[in-house]
Image (cartoon, grey):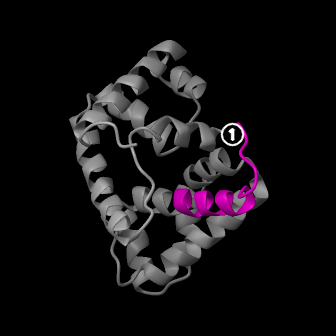
Amino acid sequence: MEDAQIISLYFARDERALTETSQKYGGLCCSTGQRILGNSQDTEECWNDVLLKAWNRIPPERPQYFAAYLVTMMRNAALTLYEKLHAEKRGGTQTMLVLDELENCLSAPDDVEETVSAAETGEQIRQFVKTLSEDARNIFILRYVYMMPVKEIAERFHIGQSKVKVSLHRSRAALRDYLGGDRL
């Protein structure tokens, strides 16, 4: 079923919207959640939360890019749950690696002004990603949106891990410059 048809089911308050959403995007969203959480039960909990949020937000929202809309909600739900579950521990998981890599590019908001600034930074990052070459953009998105390990990215594009690491390093350096230098 096409995205527009699924969204129409949400607007009609037809529960088939949830089934169709799960069939079409459940695997993609759950793989994103699994990379962050590393636990299928927690991932399933987040996916159910995402479906509930989609049901409650559509309508009035009408997402233009339904897959991105769902993946973003899933990533945010998984990161929130991850923080809750690991507030005391800091392990070597993919999530911490990805966040550590971006640490020098982005600052954490400490007050209201910085929170507003963070929203503006999000838009700047979206604009920055558009400036990257297609290969660099794909690698950047797989790493920092889908939190895919370097090894999997290399396998997906049939390139060496070192090429992926170099691409990510260059993209982070370009992002730092794009955002106005070192953000620490």
Residue 145 left/right relative to 123: right
Residue positioned 39% across, 63% down in the render? 3
Q: Taken as a whole, is the magenta stretch helix, strand or loop?
A: helix
Q: Nearer the viewer, residue 70 or 1?
A: 70
Q: Is residue 63 above or below residue 36?
A: below
Q: Position of residue 122 (x, y in %)?
A: 33, 55
Residue 132 versus residue 62 in the image, above or below: above
At label 1, the amino acid type is Thr
Q: Is 89 contained in the magenta span?
A: yes
Question: Where does label 1 land, which residue?
Answer: 93
Number of other residues with Cα within 10 Å of mark 1, as a class: few under 14, some 14 to 19, many 20 or more: few
Between 171 and 13, which is closer to the camera in this rendering? 171
Q: Considering the image in quadrants, where does the C terminus appear? A: top left
Q: Is residue 129 above or below residue 152?
A: below
List x then y, in percent, for residue 85.
74, 60
Provide residue 49's location: percent of width, then percent of height: 62, 72
Give the quadrant of residue 149.
top right
Looking at the image, can residue 131 be seen?
yes
Q: Is residue 89 left or right of residue 103?
A: right
Q: Residue at x 60, y 63 (%)?
A: 80
Highlighted range, magenta: 74-92
Does the magenta segment cover residue 70? no
**Residue at the image position 44 percent from the left and 80 percent from the top:** 57
